[in-house]
Amino acid sequence: MPDRAPQPVDRQLPTEEARDLIALVRDIAHQEIAPNAAEEEDAGRFPREVFTLLSRSGLLGLPYDSEYGGGDQPYEVYLQVLEELAAARLTVGLGLSVHTLASYALATYGTKAQQVEHLPAMLGGGLLGAYALSEPASGSDAASLRTKAVRDGDDWVITGTKSWITHGGIADFYTVMARTGGEGPRGITAFLVPGDAEGLTAAAPEKKMGLKGSPTAQIHLDGVRVGDDRRIGEEGQGFAIALSALDSGRLGIAACAIGVAQAALDEATAYATERRQFGRPIADFQGLRFMLADMATQIEAGRALYLTAARLRDAGRPFAREAAMAKLFCTDTAMKATTDAVQILGGYGYTADFPAERYMREAKVLQIVEGTNQIQRMVIARHVAGPETR
């Protein structure tokens, strides 16, 4: 059964331009993305042509400076674009979020010369990015990463393995964190590595329970040589850049999660109003009505939470605590809403003929990526109660 088109969300948008932008995104989502989502996810096909379309439509660089091909949009608007795309197909919404994350280091910490040289192609030239921080032995403990970059004249030679890389093997560029100094966070530096660099290879994509159309793979850097002009920020600044990027990236995951949750609610509501038992629609039964009410309430609360964090970011105010809260709450909401959608559809919800089971499988990964929800609780607790005592 084809995915149902999500019901339009009544959004609070700051400008007429933003309203037009959301209308464009909805058209793309409903006409170009959603119709093929179930079939392509089942086949494990990555929709590169969709990302080409997004690039041509000016959607791959929305929160960045128009001087370099970006859209000059506030995060408040950009995140609602992500939500719309993720509701149509999470592979696309998450892919845009990861591309934005991969572009962040250069857009925020790069020199003017670096930005002029690289950002136009990254933001509007059809390129697709990946973010390479995690490693086989350093996931949540990212400061213990082992990939090394050794100075050789005007170049750096990078050796190591990165894991769980979204777009691994298909990305046109990677933002890579590598160790250039001693142990710990102060010894890490950021680099912009071309996807076709000699010595860079990708393993076979991971076989995942969901998001099958989005390739996730290890990448191996075997003496990859890049010029010092591809070092982003100062030596030893890489971990700070990575954490700063992840604060914004977590908002992207939160928005994607609400998109998936909204799609699940739309599916469950449509089914419940059509399915008849005991002579009337099952949506008439109080137990089920209360489930739909709870889903809708949690989704609205999650949307409000990520937008509050986005508005703090747009105002130049600290937002790390709110970003962690949004990532935690919104992804937990997505897991609960998609599980409830499967329950409402009953036996049909457990089949691949309806998208509810796919939403449930996809929601799970959102509780893990870009900092597990246990890590988010640690971040929030530090803001509330201060750092742990030893």
Image (cartoon, helix red, strand yellow):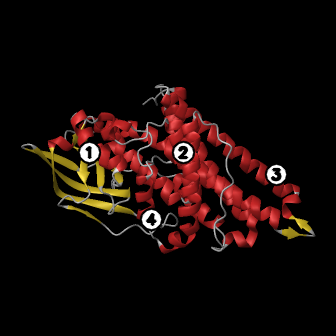
Instruction: Check residue 21 in the rendering and tell me which mark sits there, or answer none.
Output: 2
Disc 3 to disc 1, C-alpha distance:
51 Å
Give the residue type that dot 3 points to.
Answer: Phe
Report the Cα–Cα distance between label 2 and label 4.
21 Å
Q: Position of residue 15 (x, y in %)?
A: 57, 34
Vertical position of residue 347 compared to residue 310: above or below? below
Mark linked to residue 47: 4
The percent position of residue 300, horizontal first and vertical second, equals 68, 42
Q: Is residue 99 visible?
A: yes
Using a 10 Å C-alpha cutoff, classify the residue at mark 3 as few (fewer than 14 neighbours), some (14 to 19) or many (20 or more): few
Q: Quadrant of residue 29?
A: bottom right
Residue position for label 1 = 118
Q: At label 1, which amino acid type do we have?
A: His
Q: Are marks 3 and 1 in contact (CB under 8 Å)?
A: no
| Residue for badge 3 | 290
Disc with the residue nearer the chain's start (3 vs 1): 1
Disc 2 residue type? Leu
